[in-house]
Image (tube, rainbow, N blue to C red):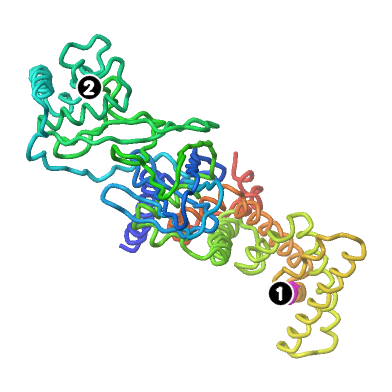
Amino acid sequence: MRRWHLLSLVLVLLVTAVSLIAYKVRVLGYPLTPNEEVEGWIVEARLSFEPTGAALKAELAIPLDPPGYVLLDENFVSRGYGLQTEERGDRRMALWSTRRPSGHQTLYYRATVARSDEEREPQPAPPLDQAPEYEELEGEAVQAILDEVRSKSADIATFASILVRVLASPAPDNNVQLLLPNPASRDELARTAIRVLAGARIPARMVQGIRLADGASGLRTEPWLEVNNGDDWIPIDPGDGARGYPDDFLVWWRGGDAPYAVDPARGAELRFSVTRTLEPALEMVTRQAQLAESPVMAYSLSTLPVDVQNVYRALLLIPIGVLLIVFMRNVVGIQTFGTFMPVLIALAFRETDLMSGAILFSVIVALGLAVRFYLEHLKLLLVPRLAVVVIVVILLMLLVSMLSYRMQFDIGLSVALFPMVIMAMTIERISIVWEEHGAGDAIRQSIGSLLVAVACYLVMFQPRVDHFVFVFPEVLLVVLALALLLGRYTGYRLSELLRFRAFAGAGRP
């Protein structure tokens, strides 16, 4: 019964950890490796004008929930201007104001966007109550076009696509020629399609956006068409009737009027520049999850202050080292001083480097051990003796640091980062084992502790392990499950198989 209880607990821990990791990777897009990068775009809008009066107000439409993209960051550059933003229906506006502008003025808005596969909530719109008023000939042409399109369509989406193709035909009929010049621009096609669709009580609106091309400057917006089928808005290319936005199209604002207004001023002009950028995948995904208000982000380490994140980045690696120690002791059979001392020494190695840290640790322990044997002749009590060892260890650290500095060996300055109390206890433990079991056992356990500390350092601070544990701390549930399983291991240690190999050979015929 106890065995099944343990196995059930291990299974629950494993399933929970794997489920959380899979959700983060597949749904939120968290990277599995530390060096992954994702594509982002920096889009800059530049509004320039010449003031013609005193107090000035300027408005600029800025992105609001663009389909297929997520807005990660935005900046405004406008020295001497007051700034605020507000939402007006399906628009978002930046509002600048100043009292005494002088000379040519330029206002900047910069947005960082990235592609997003997150599904947007549907935005249904009720059908129009009544058709617009057309002039007599215009009304007859609109009705003839609607009758032709209605006979060839199956739903609102196909109706709008066919209508656009009829309007954009290179050889338009008389009805189309009455409504549009030949050739017609995309803007004229979109506006005419909206007006004709209104005759069929179908809501439609114009959308303005830009193409994301690396290094592009001086861009102007490109008009697009959106038609509502009662469930959501369907994008349609006003040039050929194709449905859906291109992958490189960023919706900037919705509406047929100008995206900016400056009063009083003249010569207002809006231009866009685009730059492609590669950003760390973890940073990008974290910002996307925060904007999407994912419930996982409420308990994510990335929401903590940076200094606290740095603390937990090291603490979360300790269970990995502890599991390795359990494996090395119970399965391999390497003897160490204590259970956690090698992990703490590995943490100290992180602040120096592996080779220098191992040398410095060995030197200080050896010198401290010599002092400990000298103290044995003074017949001190246990607690005072430990206090003396701690004081001596600190003095040795100071001495090594000073000598390292004089010899221009900067690595020695990091010796103070070693856990001095642990080192003092290690020195005390080595001396006791030396006295009770001999020098062989003491040296063997010292070497084993140092080897395990090196192994912990190599595993814990491998960049992929460091990244994976910090991004997916639920992997510690897997570590916990493995530790529980190792706790029931009662088989032979590998060192015992090597030690008693002669008996195995003796039993053969």
Residue type at numbered disc 1: Arg
Q: Residue at x 48, y 53 (%)?
A: 471
Placement of 314 over or under 93, stated as above or below: below
Disc number for residue 164:
2
Q: Helix, strand, or loop for circle 1?
A: helix
- Count of number-bearing discs: 2
Q: Nearer the viewer, residue 464 or 389?
A: 464
Q: Is residue 305 above or below residue 46?
A: below
Magenta span: predominant SS is helix
Q: Residues within 10 Å of mark 2 (few under 14, many from 20)?
A: many
Quarter of the picture holding the C terminus: top right
Which of the marked residues, 2 or 1, is nearer the chain's N terminus?
2
In this view, the residue in front, 473 or 396, is 473
Q: Quadrant of the N terminus?
A: bottom left
**x 30%, y 40%: residue:** 254
Q: Quadrant of residue 363?
A: bottom right
Q: Quadrant of residue 278?
A: top right
| Residue 153 located left or right of residue 112 | left
In magenta, the rendered stretch is 424-430
Depth check, front residue: 267 or 165: 267
In the image, 57 versus 231, the foreground residue is 57
Residue 38 placed where, x, y %?
A: 50, 39
Residue 429 image label? 1
* Distance from Cα at disc 2 to Cα at disc 1: 86 Å
Write the residue at 48% across / 47% down. 109
Question: In x, y percent, where is residue 65?
Answer: 34, 46
Task: Using a 10 Å C-alpha cutoff, classify the residue at mark 1 as few (fewer than 14 neighbours), some (14 to 19) or many (20 or more).
Answer: some
- Horizontally, is 9 left or right of 469 in the view? left
Amino acid on which the number 2 mark rests in the picture: Val
Residue 22 in picture, x, y percent from top left: 38, 46
Name the residue at the right extreme.
Answer: 406
Q: Looking at this rendering, what residue extends furthest in the top direction?
A: 171
